[in-house]
Image (cartoon, rainbow, N blue to C red):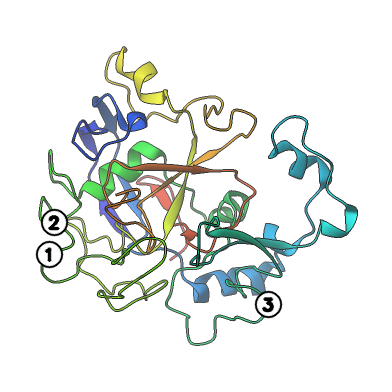
Amino acid sequence: MVSIPGGEFDMGSDARLARPDERPVHRVQVDPFRMDATEVTNAQFRRFVEATGYVTTAEKPPRLKDVMAQLPPGSPTPPPASLVPGALVFVSPSGGEWWWRWVAGADWKHPQGPASNVEGLDNHPVVQVSWFDAEAYCRWAGKRLPTEAEWEFAARGGLKGKTYAWGDADPYHGKPLANIWQGDFPRQNTVADGYKGTSPVRSFPPNGYGLYDMTGNVWEWVQDWYRFDAYARRASKSVPANPQGPADSFDPEEPYIQKRVQRGGSFLCDDGYCASYRPSARMKASPDTGLSHTGFRCVVSSAAPHRP
């Protein structure tokens, strides 16, 4: 793990690429803590599963009430035969269809579906893990998920007012600095950075705190509930110390779904669609959802004991 010094910083962004839920910029204080230098890998997650017998969310049949909670009100009830284990997989579209598909049999051991596996990918970040799976791993390891404030403070690596974790250099010019999308998203990936999907952790330079892949590779679950207006609510108050996030979730795009925050961008982020390869960028998803571009890393408070 890497020691993060803590301190006050400007959270959020008013830059050109910033989305509404990154605004307004506001001061936040976090205490010192320690953070995993890399995203949790397949090898690390396998040790957890072998030690505990843990079964991930994607490996269990979904409950009807949970499925209905993620559908717009009035949606028809899906047939029982459709309630099978699986997760969401990115599939590059050939036409105008949506690029996320629910694939039966997709899970952390089979991230693209039952015909895939993670052989030879021990040092790649684990994916297809729900927020609940990430929480369970952290508890087993004697750690926890970072708060959104801790994550952003760490991602900035000590830099102030910079667009990216490395400064202001455009990620599409010069030597690749992160595993992100190159080409015409979502149809064509030129693989200019060497990776079509996930990359091994530590494949790109660390930030100023020695943390790898705080930009790109996979989105990372954090502790907080997602609210689009979380920053607007917080900015009207004095500088908060160690904010734990809102008490509930609200996404006006899908008000019927409770969501948790994800941070860091992934190998699917590009400048034309989401530009989420920035420390301030926020994403959200239902906590029981597995996705082929989502993983996590853990933290511990500086005074807390943890397993090596």
Residue shown at 13%/45% (left/top)? 159
Label 2 with label 3: CB-CB less than 8 Å: no
Secondary structure of the residue carrying numbered label 1: loop
Please state, as top left, top right, bottom left or bottom right, where the N terminus lies in the image.
bottom left
In front: 54, or 13? 13
Residue in the picture at 31% in, 75% down = 191
Image position, residue 162 (x, y; %): 13, 43
How far is the residue under mark 2 from the one under mark 3?
A: 38 Å
Mark toward the viewer: 3 or 1: 1
The crowding category of the residue bearing disc 1, from other C-alpha atoms within 10 Å (few below 14, some 14 to 19, many at least 20), is few
Q: Are marks 3 and 1 in contact (CB under 8 Å)?
A: no
Q: Marks 2 and 1: in contact by CB < 8 Å?
A: yes
- Residue 283 in the image: state x and y as whole percent: 43, 43
The spot of residue 245 in percent (x, y) is 45, 29
* Amino acid, disc 2: Asp
- How many numbered marks, from 0 up? 3
Spatial separation of the CA atoms under disc 3 and disc 1: 37 Å
**Badge 1 is on which residue?**
173
Q: Which image quadrant: the C terminus?
A: bottom left
Label 3, residues with CA under 10 Å away: few <14, some 14-19, many ≥20: some
Does any portion of residue 56 appear in the rendered image? no
Per the image, label 2 sits on a secondary structure element best described as: loop
Q: Residue at x 71, y 70 (%)?
A: 105
Q: Which residue is mark 2?
A: 170
Going from N to C along the chain, the mark reached first, 3 or 1, is 3
Q: CA distance from mark 1 to mark 2?
A: 6 Å
- Pointer 3 residue: 114
**Left or right of 182 in this view: 107:** right
